[in-house]
Amino acid sequence: MSVIAPLLPENAPFSPLQRAWLDGFLAGLLGDDTAPDPSSPGLTRGSLETASDGRVEPGHDEKREVDFAAAEAAVPEDFPWHDPGLSLDVRLALAAGRPPARRLMAAMAQTDCGQCGYDCRTYAEAIASGAEPSITRCAPGGKATSRMLKELLAEVAGPAAATAVPAAASPVLPPVAPRAAEEPFAARLREARPLNRPGSEKDTRLVVLETGSDAARFEVGDSLGVVARNCPELVGAIIARLGAAPDTAVLSPDGIERPLFEALSEACEIRVPSDQAIEVLSSRAHDIDESRVLQAMAEGYPGAGPDDADLLDLLESFPSARPPLSELVSALAPLQPRLYSISSSPCHVEGEVHLTVAAVRYEKRARRRTGVASTFLCDRVPPGEAVSVYVKPGEGFRLPAPERAMIMIGPGTGVAPFRAFLQERQAIGAPGKNWLFFGNPRRQTDFLFEEELSLWHRGGLLTRLDTAFSRDQEHKIYVQHRLLDNAAELWAWLEDGAHLYVCGDALRMARDVDRGLVYIVAKEGRMEPAAAKAYLARLAAEGRYQKDVY
Ligand SMILES: Cc1cc2nc3c(=O)[nH]c(=O)nc-3n(C[C@H](O)[C@H](O)[C@H](O)COP(=O)(O)OP(=O)(O)OC[C@H]3O[C@@H](n4cnc5c(N)ncnc54)[C@H](O)[C@@H]3O)c2cc1C
Ligand SMILES: NC(=O)c1ccc[n+]([C@@H]2O[C@H](COP(=O)([O-])OP(=O)(O)OC[C@H]3O[C@@H](n4cnc5c(N)ncnc54)[C@H](OP(=O)(O)O)[C@@H]3O)[C@@H](O)[C@H]2O)c1
């Protein structure tokens, strides 16, 4: 079924071949939404209010052509579901009828975030080929993804396939180790310096890790994988609930025997108990009602048990469920490393790698909860202690040629890689122009790297610095509003060959920014929205529109 057919008028000047190509090409990029939506919460201010229907009338002579010949040769297969903004159902529908690896791919979260050690396509291919036995590695997809992968595997290969998925009784998975190219090494934490001022609702830190002169080879645009440990108080509370001794030897999810405290600290995901672990709890619960609720939770029935329950929540809510320790611990998912965009250039600071980390802390059911890796770095690793890290190459997120202009859009921690980009451009004396859009809640407390960025702005490294402080006024102002405020100049930069970068939140920000960009291209380039989307698709295909989103 054509995904974009409704966008193309019958008399649009495209050959059937061009039409077919454009369909596949745009569907892969855009999914099923067809026009910038001015009612989107991210796009309801400023110049957009003057647009009556979100469309821009094209000037007859100025309608732009897409270079079909080049693109036809360059894009052999389309992935219409590869859009994190589409729902799981829509993604699966778009992949219906495709080979198993593609249907498995459609179940992934589509952010290509790299946390699983692959991208969405290669993770699916590895599962389909049997090379990758774990179906729980897609962190942004969470349980919805792993459950769907399990279902698809069973469907594709018949009932026998279900046994290929690690079952509760035989849950031993291979260790979650980064791929060979991403060898872990020890880096010493020097500091986790606050970047917010007192009074902020956020706690974002500049984490400085000393790597030594040759331990880490990385390029700006890469991310750093951090092998974190769970919060010891939480581990202690779980062990107390289990009524166990911390040094009891247990089998971990990676098949290695460790003392219980160490296993729960270093080898197990305890924030999101796996379905297999919940099944183990259910099968061992003495209370029949508890067993039924746990079984319903393991099968994914919404509202069956406490929402977003971690392992401690389950042990508190279901006191009759006390399986043998090894059975429970080995059924948990392996603890995965977390990725952080590298915030420093090796040309600027030698022997160090900097990260910009937002500490995750929130309260739920009267208990304070903390993000595993962010609070490990911000709160728990004392200065001087070694942390196990690895470099995850940021393929597809790279600086342009030195003379090319860059437009960088990075609200919140999204500014992280752009600090590295700017440091590098300064160090190598790159003559290209640089424009940064930064946003955060409040200028007074949340202007991350204000001094550095202002200095670069005054010194000319940053040709332009535009900020969007969302909560400094009654209505929200986001980076995409600043893009719209500067539409004409932005368009001129793009037409001059500038490269466009977006980093930060994938689900809301990057999607709304993309809509804003479509609107700008349509308005300034005098195009229909479909042609504006094709323009951005072409930039992406040429490596001039790159994203590092999570
Ligand atoms: C390529 C890439 C680059 C990244 N770069 C950065 C970066 O530069 N800086 C950065 O800070 N992060 C970055 N991240 C995100 C980072 O990897 C982690 O996901 C993030 O730090 C949270 O990890 P954690 O282990 O601290 O939290 P986790 O233990 O994984 O917990 C996070 C989870 O807690 C829950 N949660 C969080 N807040 C709330 C709340 N208020 N209410 C209820 N539930 C909540 C959500 O389910 C959330 O998914 C990046 C991710 C990727 C993939
Ligand atoms: N997918 C994820 O799970 C995910 C993604 C990103 C960040 N996070 C986590 O959230 C924490 C903080 O993130 P952060 O500091 O990077 O910043 P952030 O919370 O993403 O916010 C940065 C700025 O972006 C604004 N914003 C909110 N919605 C937006 C939209 N649709 N378009 C454009 N801007 C928008 C925010 O405004 P308001 O807050 O005032 O609305 C704020 O001013 C971190 O722990 C991080 O790991 C999680």
Image (tube, helix red, strand yellow):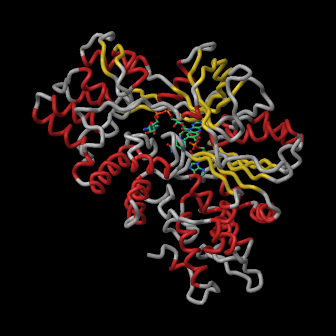
Q: Does residue 465 lie above or below 361 as drawn?
A: below
Please state the quadrant of the image where ligand 2 appears.
top right
| Residue drawn at the location 54% of the way across and 48% of the way down | 112
Tell me the quarter of the image containing the N terminus: bottom left
Q: Does residue 132 lie above or below 207 as drawn?
A: below
Percent x, y of residue 254 = 38, 27
- Position of 65 with respect to 464 (left or right) is left
- Position of 40 with respect to 305 (left or right) is right
Image quarter of residue 451:
top right
Q: Which residue appears farthest toward the bottom when viewing the image?
A: 11
Q: Does residue 253 lie above or below 8 as drawn?
A: above
Percent x, y of residue 189 = 63, 19
- Position of 356 with respect to 152 (left or right) is right
* 366, 55: nearer the viewer: 55
How many numbered callouts?
0
| Residue drawn at the location 42% of the way across and 42% of the way down | 131
| Residue drawn at the location 60% of the way across and 45% of the way down | 504
* 453, 162: nearer the viewer: 162
| Residue drawn at the location 37% of the way across and 67% of the way down | 97
Percent x, y of residue 124 = 44, 50
Percent x, y of residue 534 = 64, 70
Tell me the quarter of the image containing the C terminus: top right
